[in-house]
Amino acid sequence: MIIKTKDFGNVEICEEDIVKFPHGLYGFEDSKEFVVLSDNKEDNPFMWLQSVRNIEPRFVVIDPMKIFKNYYVPPEAARPLIPIDDERDLRFLAITTVTSGAKEVYVNLKCPIVINARKNIAAQVILDIDDYPFRYYLVKREG
Amino acid sequence: MLVLTRHSGESLIIGDNIKITVIEVQGDKVKLGINAPKEIPVVRKELLEAAQSANEEAASPNVELKLLKGVLKEKNPEKS
């Protein structure tokens, strides 16, 4: 199936690529199917979490462990929301805000997306952990 | 809105399986204990609202990924 994207144009995906979000994302509760798209030609840690149905919403995401090697999401945080048989199936993504012209770039480490990669089911969680901020700045405009 | 008065140590039940207990009252702070089935997420309202606005802010930027390629290296973040 072909989906429309802003950055990569039309992209062909298959059913197995689709990650289901039974609860949507916070503020986007109706968006229940996404694909993760990366630019294969580039060695780029940032990826798109692209809605399957529409060109929007789409989010820039990154593996939070690329920022903090020991980044940890307690599986209990996701257990109410998605089935977890084995913690080793879990993958994480952090939503990244990029302001116009990439003048500011910051990563939401407070609300990671937890993916059961075996079942392709995911949910966004809120971590009540003070060490992880809503805005971890990678680029910050001074003044 | 249903308004109930409870003392410390007293509880209320919502539905079949959610119990909220007033653990302690101190000044304008109330400590609550919540027993709920694990499939029911419990979250502080201001955190939920912050999560929603963070997503709204991040949604659908007009940016190309390749523009971000070097951002992480430049930042050279501390590894915890």
Image: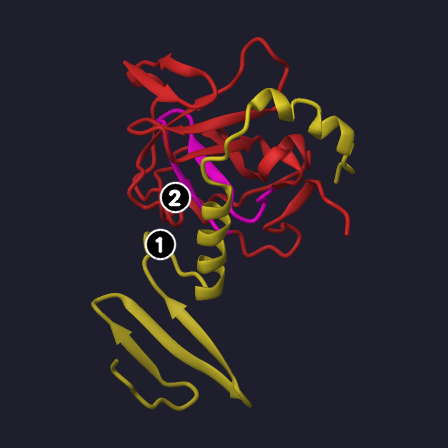
Chain colours: A red, B yellow
Range shown magenta:
A107-126
The quadrant where residue A17 appears: top left
User: In the visual, does A65 lie left or right of B41?
Assistant: right
Q: Are marks 2 and 1 in contact (CB under 8 Å)?
A: no
Identify the residue position indicated by label 2 in the image. Answer: A25
Vertical side of B39 occupied by A52: above or below: above
Residue B66, x across and y down, in percent: 61, 20
Q: Which residue is label 1 attached to?
A: B38
**Residue B13 vs residue A67, the one in the foreground:** A67
Image position, residue B61 (x, y; %): 50, 35
Q: Is residue B44 above or below residue A46?
A: below
Tell me the SS state at disc 2: loop
Question: What residue is rendered at 58% in x and 37% in y?
Answer: A100
Density class for disc 2 (Cα within 10 Å; few <14, some 14-19, many ≥20) is: many
Residue A114, magenta (yes or no): yes
Tell me which residue sits at (43%, 45%) in the image: A78
Of the 4 image quadrants, the one containing the N terminus of chain A is top left
Q: Is residue B5 above or below residue A61?
A: below
Camera-side residue: A96 or A87?
Answer: A96
Callout 1: few (<14), some (14-19), or many (20+) C-alpha neighbours within 10 Å? few
The amino acid marked with disc number 1 is Lys
Indicate the chain on which mark 1 is placed.
Answer: B
Q: How many marks?
A: 2
Callout 1 secondary element: loop
* Image side of residue A106 versus residue A32, left or right: right
